[in-house]
Image (tube, rainbow, N blue to C red):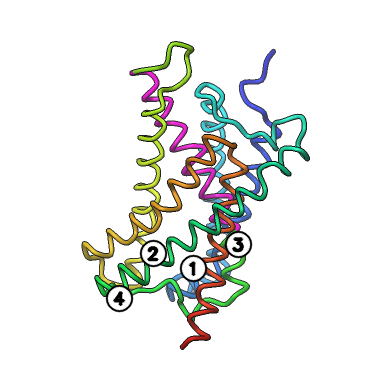
Amino acid sequence: MRNIINWKTFFTLSVACAITSVMVIPYQAALVPEVAEMGAAIYFIALAQGVVIFSIVTFLGLLLAPKVGFSLPILEGNNRRATLKAILAPSILLGLLSGILIVAAEFFVFQGLLDVNISLGDARVTVWAAFMASFYGGIAEEVLMRLFVMTLFVWLLSKIKRNTDGSPAVWSIWVAIAVASVLFGIGHLPLTGELTEITAPVVARAIVLNGIGGVVFGWLYWKKGLESAIIAHFSADIVLHIITPMVTKGLG
């Protein structure tokens, strides 16, 4: 009997997402006192939620991805070393560039023109906590937003219109990239609401800044596979959560 998904990939991604759901807690605790006050319990809660949620989204993502032409070339391919060598440099480069673009939009638009009372360079977060959180962004958020959400929307839209060869229409992929990017931005608002009042500029900031990364990561997922998006997202988070705070602290 043919397996409906690659179960080895399923367990690899599900476990990785559950673990990184715990790894992000110190970052959240540094920003939100209520999280820190929960003590060890928050780690068990995060692990349990991570196991349940990411098992579901990973399964559905792996089930639908082959139907719309998306791939995981390293986890499921044959020539993994060659594939990693081919995607590593462009993935890191595009991730770093997207991080730089996000920082530029933050300081020149949202801090400069709109005077939003929140910043990427938060002094309360230690370097090690930011580094740990970058794994959650790179792995868990890409599994959720690209493997699951983007794949799901492409699959749904392909029911409306496909190319003659059965592949999804390009417009449907771009719509899915945009939808996943907007949802990615909106998903950051609960944490943002713990730091500042939610206003129209704050909502715009969340959507635009996260949307920059979302478009880049979505394009990489489409063209080079999920692992490329993961590498790029992790690289962008290093710029945002480690390099940028270090630079702003130094300048301050």
Q: Is residue 136 magenta?
A: yes
- Distance from disc 3 to disc 1, alpha carbons, whole Å, reads 10 Å
Looking at the image, residue 158 lies above or below residue 57: above
Residue 221 is a magenta residue: no
Residue 191 location (% of width, % of height): 39, 64
x, y percentage for residue 201? 24, 64
Classed neighbour count for the residue bearing mark 2: other residues with Cα under 10 Å, few (<14), some (14–19), many (≥20): few
**Location of mark 4 (residue):** 117
Q: Earlier in the sequence, mark 1 or mark 4?
A: 1
Distance in Å between CA atoms under marks 3 and 2: 16 Å
Q: Which residue is mark 1?
A: 28
Question: Looking at the image, is mark 3 or mark 2 earlier in the sequence?
Answer: 3
Task: Using the image as rendered, state which of residue 247 and residue 48 is in the foreground.
Answer: 247
Lower position in the chain sequence, tag 3 or tag 1: 3
| 55 relative to 138, above or below | above
Q: In the image shown, does 242 or 165 lie closer to the viewer?
A: 165
The boundaries of the magenta stretch are: 135-160
Q: Are marks 1 and 2 in contact (CB under 8 Å)?
A: yes
- The answer for how far apart the CA atoms under marks 1 and 2 are is 8 Å
Residue ID for mark 3: 23
For the residue marked with disc 1, what is the amino acid?
Gln
In the rendered structure, find residue 191 and report the number of the disc placed on it: 2
Q: Is label 3 in a helix, a strand or a loop?
A: helix
The earlier-in-sequence mark between 3 and 4 is 3
Secondary structure found at label 2:
helix
Q: Position of residue 184 (x, y in %)?
A: 40, 50
Mark nearer the viewer, 1 or 4 = 4
Inspect the image, locate mark 4, and give the three-letter code of the amino acid beneath it: Asn
Residues under labels 4 and 2: Cα distance? 14 Å
- Place residue 6 in its image quadrant: top right
